[in-house]
Image (spheres, rainbow, N blue to C red):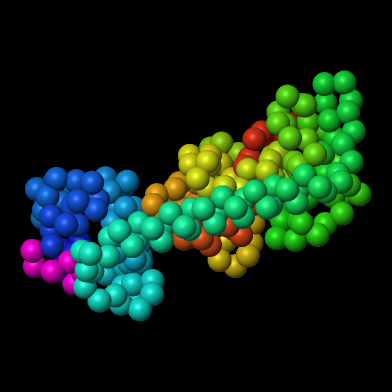
Amino acid sequence: MRLRQIRLELFGEHGGPELARRLDLPARTWYNYETGVTVPAEVMLNFIDQTGIYPAWLLTGEGEVFRDAPPTRIRLDLAPLQMIHYALELLELESKAREQNDKLLNRSVKIEHHNDFISLPLIGMDEVPGYESTPLAQRDQFLVYSKWVPCPTNSVCLRVNSHAMSNLIPNQSVVVVDLNQTNPLTLNGKVVVGLDQKNQAIIRRLEHSGDHVILRAERSGREFPMITYTLKESQSRIIGEVVAVNSPIDV
């Protein structure tokens, strides 16, 4: 089984208990997984995080095994250093998020109020990668209920052109995106707008595990693959949180 293959390569013949410790599992539980017992999703994500392997290889056995150069066997005395490195990455991520929020707070966006409604700039999915340089105050406006929008001066409306989240967000809906909310550490389980590997805008549910961030569609299939970032990569890939949905009305 591929789980055992990776454990042997990185932790050695007798390294099962150490890998189990890193995964916060009893050693016997890990050995059960190696023999074919179904592995829970959170354990699998943590295993991918600990070993640096490609999820696709783990599922199919095809393609590259490791995201970087194949590592040497893990030395047990490196664990504290790895923990320090991870903590520094978290601090850097929080600092980047604060800088982006400060930048957004200083940006002037025209907000018009209509009793209980406000007008927000409306952009298309293809415009998201360059949204920071878009003169949002001069864009088309979309009327939304004011109570939907926690931060009106740092929010935009986005017209959806995908069925990836159709159970929650039908195609051609207009969603309200809070541009303040970009820190994946606070967005676990939330629906966000992000950029995929081709720098195209996508709407997915965010999952955070260790030093990895996963964007997952509600609909499964090859058309809507899972997107995986390292925590550090996600600093520039998360655009904001979807805080409201205005679904199209069938006539």
Question: Is residue 91 at all visible to an observer of this figure?
Answer: yes
Image quadrant in which you'd find residue 127? bottom right
Q: Residue at x 47, y 57 (%)?
A: 88
Horizontal side of 59 relative to 116 (left or right) equals left
Q: Is residue 11 above or below residue 35?
A: below
Query: Residue at the location (77% across, 56% down)?
Result: 132
State the image quarter where residue 152 is shown. Answer: top right
Residue plotted at (89% across, 41% down): 110
Task: Please tell me whether residue 13 belongs to the stretch shown in magenta.
Answer: yes
39 vs 67: above or below: above
In the rendered image, the residue lying farthest to the bottom is: 69
Residue 78 at what x, y percent from top left? 27, 65
Q: Quadrant of the N terminus?
A: bottom left
Task: Give the side of residue 95 with respect to residue 231, left or right.
Answer: right
At x 32%, y 53%, the residue is 46
Q: Position of residue 164 (x, y in %)?
A: 55, 48
Left or right of residue 8, residue 185 in this image: right
**Is residue 196 highlighted in magenta?**
no
Residue 245 at what x, y percent from top left?
A: 66, 34
What residue range appears in magenta? 9-14
Please state if 79 lies on the left or on the right of 173 as rendered: left
In-front residue for pair 37/16: 16
Q: Give the farthest residue toward the top.
A: 115
- Whether residue 171 appears in this view of the structure is no
In the rendered image, the quadrant that contains the C terminus is top right
How far from the left and from the top, in percent, is residue 57? 31, 68
Q: Is residue 20 or residue 99 the one in the foreground? A: 99
